[in-house]
Amino acid sequence: MEIAERAQALALKIRKHKVGIQTEEATKNAFVMPFISTVLGYDVFNPAEVIPEFTADVGLKKGEKIDYAIAHGGNIQLLMEVKKITEPLRLEHASQLFRYFAVTNARIAILTNGEKYEFYTDLDAPNRMDSKPFLVLDFSDVDETLLPELAKLTKESFDLESVINAAGELKYIGQLKRALATQFKEPEDEWVKFLTTRVYEGSFTQRVREQFVPLVVKASRQFLNEQVNDRLKNALGGPDAYVSVSGGQAAPETATTSGEPAPDLTQPDGDIVTTEDELEGYRVVRAIVCGEVSAARVVARDNKTYFSVLLDDNNRKPIARLWLNRSKKYLGVFDESKIETRVPIDTVEDIYEHADHLRRTVGRYLVRPPQDDPAAPDHGGDAEVTAAASGG
């Protein structure tokens, strides 16, 4: 799997099991060791690569230990200190990292609670760990723009020099993004005034401030959603990627078990809105089947009533349908005849329970004779795929 799929799989695991993890040791076993092994690619059972309870004498402190040291090329490259997942990270948690950073060859220090990972280096002074991280990776909301930099710390693509060279820019971009995120959620008076005075010609009084605070929040949210949708349209197949397919009929909504009407996912101008649940479901399906085919061949297409996951952007090769924008959620799976059965699910993570079925579906398309399975993408209708309700 690509690092994005590996990171998203771990994010789902954290989301699913976080509530039951209460101690530092449990955090290490459940989340940190999988991060080291599955995301970074190091062998946690090879003491030449991953050294737990790493010990080095630091000044007058003898035998002090740090949770993990990770070696690459025979040298210690990464130091990691772990706190329990229920505890927010604070700089005082990094005291051992500060001391160890000065007496080892490591240039990267990581402070984590299993869900949030803060990466530090020595930008401000040589051999002295900075007080602010240059990269923050939060598995509660993975920022995929950071994953290419994280990939440079993996065993297979280790490139420390490139990471250090990019660290300064990453540090300030990350801080700026977090500052903007704060303003979008809870805007300060200066931010509200800055935007208001560009659209409102009157005096910025207390009454005007109270009127514009919710407008600024709403406008910021809509702007971000529009930017995300535009980017996804390009990433998933161009401007038509989120337009309802023409040339055929979609599966009738009355085929759902509940018989409830389709929710209106369109904005006033008719554009289809893709939800985070749908995107997360797409990532899960892609992560499941990318052992059978490359992730690039697993394509998403959204419309008003459901979200399709297709092989090769071909309607004749449906992998799954996601019916998530309703009170009762369903995963649509397909049999040998491409008949859809909708399976009730409670959460997106439940899709993993149907991993074998999804892999078999992809496998059938890979062995189908060429004349029955055209390779060229078909942007026609879904008329060949008939929905069958699982519950009646």
Image (cartoon, rainbow, N blue to C red):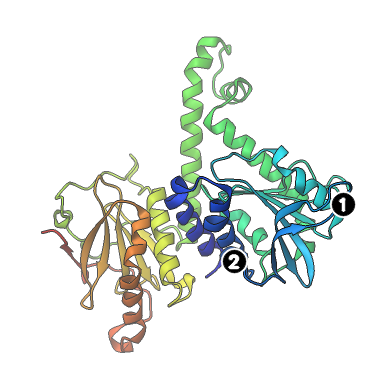
Which residue is most to the front?
62
In the image, what residue occupies the spot 84% across and 60% down?
A: 105
Which residue is most to the left?
392
Q: How many marks can you see?
A: 2
Q: Is residue 333 left or right of residue 91?
A: left
In the image, what residue occupies the spot 52% across and 31% down?
A: 185
Using the rendered image of the protein, determine whether residue 381 is visible from the camera's viewpoint: no
Q: Which residue is mark 2?
A: 37
Query: Tag 2, which secondary structure?
Result: helix
**Label number found at residue 127:** 1
Q: Which of these two is toward me, 338 or 301?
A: 338
Residue 161 location (% of width, % of height)? 80, 63
Residue 295 location (% of width, % of height)? 48, 70
Q: Which of these two is toward me, 206 or 106?
A: 106
Ranked by sequence position, the earlier of labels 1 and 2 is 2
Q: Quadrant of residue 162?
A: bottom right
In the image, what residue occupies the spot 61% across and 25% down?
A: 191
